[in-house]
Amino acid sequence: MIITKTPFRMSFFGGGTDMEDYFKENGGAVLSTTIDKFCYVNVRHLPRFFDYSTELSYSKTERVKNVSEIEHPAIRNAMEMLDMHEIRLTYEADLPARSGLGTSSSFAVGMLMAFYALKGKYADKKKLADEAIYLERILCNEAGGWQDQIAASYGGFNRINFNSNGYEVTPVIISPKRKKQLNDNLMMFFTGFTRFSSDVQKVNNETTIEEKKAKLDMMYKMVDEAETILTDNSKNLDDFGRLLDKSWKLKKQTGKGVSTDTIDELYNKGIAAGALGGKLLGAGGGGFLVFYVQPEKQNAVMKAMKDLMYIPFEFDNNGATIIHYSPETYEPREMKE
């Protein structure tokens, strides 16, 4: 039996520039961190006592005789890609799926890590990220960028640079005191809406290419500015919050699926209560709102967001990890007499 623990990510700046059709031509960068909210994937070989060979438990339960019958596209494609058979897989998470924290990619990374471990093989961070990107973007044909899979695999507070050759992950070096201050100034709320990131991306693609590129170019440049604010102790950390507001207003202009009237109303309430800035996490359309709020204004923002669930969190430094490893001897059915 294998159990993996994979963090969810919080992306601050550069989202959208991690789309392959953008960064292959223009380069791109994302500033993000993983947080102490996780998904857990438990995998073992299914004992041969049943009239089905594979059992999956996520938001629903599937029991099938052949891998090709699996409805969940990521699980089906991952099992076919890695030649996995006779599996019992269970998934659980600290936060709901389709909520803007890269949950589907965290699941993909954790599942692939578990499959490799069940085979007695080690997959490093880059291999997991690369194969999760391939699984979601190519095999499952889901629209979206590359940042989620990389963040989930590597973990920590990073700048991820994208170029025509791929990507590189660079840790953002912040003093512990400043990093804690940033963490303390961030407040996250669940809007209650969930959606598929790939569906939002499809709607956003209706925006003209020229208009979208101009906005993404500006958002790309903000990554440098945000990183400087974090790493230069002479800078006012509150400028990070103000830059979040500027970036969010730009992001909303990249596609009509990014925000809704309800989300705009909630965001404006937060700003009116004293938040310096914030954003909707993920591709847009729902999920979690994060605000940058100075300590003395946090009670007012909490009151303004009283109808939403407040989710406290801490930055996390670890990527996907194996938290339980019990090797199994497995002999394929066709080799049995």
Image (cartoon, rainbow, N blue to C red):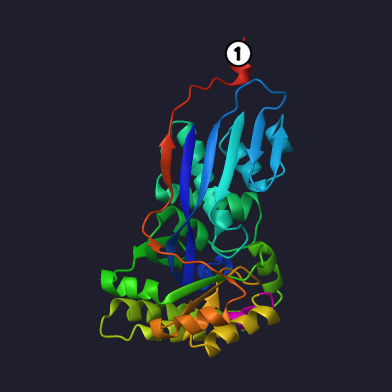
| Residue in the foreground of this view, choosing between 83 and 296 | 296
Residue found 55% across the figure and 20% down from its top: 331
Q: Which residues are magenta?
A: 251-257
Q: Residue at x 66, y 55 (%)?
A: 141
Q: Is residue 146 left or right of residue 261?
A: left
* Residue 291 visible to an observer of this rendering: yes
Q: Amino acid at mark 1?
A: Lys
Q: Residues within 10 Å of mark 1 (few under 14, many from 20)?
A: few
Quarter of the figure with residue 88: top right
Is 256 included in the stretch rendered in magenta? yes
- Residue 154 image offset from top left, x and y in percent: 40, 55
Residue visible at 59% across and 40% down?
A: 90
Q: Is residue 195 left or right of residue 250?
A: right
Residue 146 locus on image (x, y percent): 52, 61
Can residue 253 be found in the magenta stretch?
Answer: yes
Q: Is residue 154 above or below residue 52?
A: below
Query: Which quadrant does the C terminus fall into?
Result: top right
Tell me, yes or no, if residue 27 can be seen here.
no
Q: Secondary structure at mark 1?
A: loop
Q: Which residue is mark 1?
A: 336
Q: Position of residue 142 (x, y in %)?
A: 65, 57
